[in-house]
Amino acid sequence: QVQLVESGGGLVQAGGSLRLSCAASGIIFRINAMGWYRQAPGKQRELVAAITNGGSINYADSVKGRFTISRDNAKNTVYLQMNSLKPEDTAVYYCNANVTDTRTWKRDDYWGQGTQVTVSS
């Protein structure tokens, strides 16, 4: 089993910054892609940013130029630096990891517990 532990959410004023972290731990595994999703009240969960093992990155159009995703493979940790935050960025942010169990070579998706980000106007 793989555990994802998130940190870094909170309350910030519009225009401010926050940095989210997500550390993965568990049984012998290989992490493929890691990413961040968010879900606002009454809305579907949406991709914010993702980064593959090779460093390829994908951002939602709404966060391009403001958010930066990065990854420390040695620490099995992914970060999301969020700058110029807007009230519409308010949501619960979830970490996601696509993982290969190197004993069975089975791939699975794992999710963190979510961290609240609130941006006040």
Image (cartoon, rainbow, N blue to C red):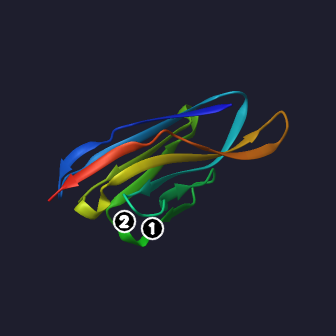
Q: Is residue 56 something that shows in the picture?
A: yes
Q: Is residue 7 left or right of residue 90?
A: right
**Alpha carbons under labels 1 and 2: distance apart:** 6 Å
Q: Amino acid at mark 1?
A: Ala
Q: Which residue is mark 1?
A: 60
**Residue furthest out toward the right:** 104
Residue 81 at x, y = what percent?
35, 50
Q: Secondary structure at mark 1?
A: loop
Instruction: Identify the residue at image location x=43%, y=44%.
Output: 79
The circle on residue 63 is: 2
| Quarter occupied by residue 1 | top right
Q: Is residue 68 above or below residue 62?
A: above
Instruction: Identify the residue at image location x=81%, y=44%.
Output: 106
Residue 73 at x, y = what percent?
57, 39
Q: Amino acid at mark 2?
A: Val
Q: Is residue 86 something that shows in the picture?
A: no
Q: Is residue 50 above or below residue 21?
A: below
Residue 40 at x, y = what percent?
37, 58
Q: Decide: marks 1, 2 in contact (CB < 8 A)?
A: yes
Q: Is residue 109 left or right of residue 19?
A: right
Instruction: Identify the residue at image location x=27%, y=56%.
Output: 83
Q: Is residue 63 left or right of residue 72?
A: left
**Residue furthest out toward the bottom:** 61
| Quarter occupied by residue 67 | bottom left
Q: Nearer the viewer, residue 102 or 89?
A: 89
Q: Nearer the viewer, residue 102 or 43?
A: 43
Mark 1 is surrounded, within 10 Å at the Cα level, by few (under 14), some (14 to 19) or many (20 or more) other residues, namely few
Instruction: Identify the residue at image location x=34%, y=38%.
Output: 8
